[in-house]
Amino acid sequence: YARGRHLSVCASVQLALGWPFLTTYPISYVKKAFEFDRVFFFMWTVNWKFLPEEMFVSKPWALVLLLCHLGTLALLAKKWWAASLSQKGEWMCWMKSKSNKQSVRLSPEYVIYTMFVSNYIGIVFARTLHYQFYCWYFYSLPMMHLMATITSTMSATSIFLSTIATIVAIFGGEYAFNVFPATEQSSMILQISHAFLMLRIFQSNVPTIAVDDRKVKLT
């Protein structure tokens, strides 16, 4: 019930802000708010400049990106769900059997990790990224790289090499968003850095709380 109340507050704010438009031009407002058939300008894209313009503006390409977005979310959601079931505390989480509930406390690391990765998936499969969009996720990159690679079983050499790879990947994205106008090379570097972190996320486990000693760890 508490979760429903919180969601209703969010929905109420959005409804209140859009009320003047919903009461005057509802169809136009809703149509423009969810403009799925919008065609973006190829000249401004930062992430897909290496594609042919005909492919960039095509509807099949937009559909491919949407399916990749939803598919990636679905695959990772399975890992997140399993990780949530391994934690204990105040939050309520349904088990596979609807008649069986288990009290679950989600760690701050788990919550921020799933939120950051969910946002990052949207960035990776975005139809286009403009320069100002970098502010959507640049601050989350170091934490995602750290949580997706550093574990207690890694050797000092592995940690060092992983850190170097992280720095290179982050600076690759930084470089791409500082090239104006974007080029095929800068877009390719950006996508390589995106794919590198995405691969790390798929290969790594999810941050959780240990059940026995209640200490936060990467399991």
Image: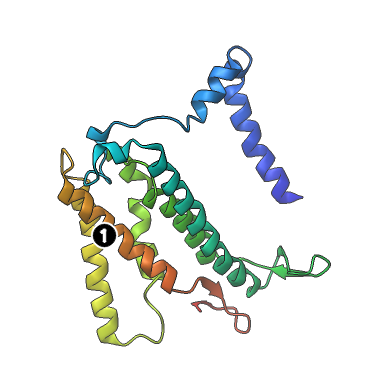
Query: Picture coordinates of residue 216 (x, y %)?
Result: 52, 75
Kindly identify the residue that appears in the image at 60 percent across and 11 percent down.
Answer: 24
Q: Is residue 64 left or right of residue 210?
A: left
Q: Nearer the viewer, residue 72 or 13?
A: 72
Q: In this view, does 172 lie to the left or right of 32?
A: left
Residue bearing mark 1: 192
User: With respect to residue 4, does 17 lie above or below?
Assistant: above
Work out which residue is located at the far top of the displayed protein and give it: 24
Query: Picture coordinates of residue 127 (x, y %)?
Result: 37, 42
Query: Picture coordinates of residue 122 (x, y %)?
Result: 43, 49
User: With respect to residue 91, does 179 lie above or below?
Assistant: above
Kindly identify the residue that appears in the image at 63 percent across and 80 percent down.
Answer: 211
User: With respect to residue 208, does 181 lie above or below?
Assistant: above
**Label 1 residue SS:** helix
Residue type (three-letter) at the residue carrying disc 1: Ile
Work out which residue is located at the far right of the displayed protein and give it: 99
Q: In this view, does 41 lie to the left or right of 186?
A: right
Query: Picture coordinates of residue 35 (x, y %)?
Result: 48, 29
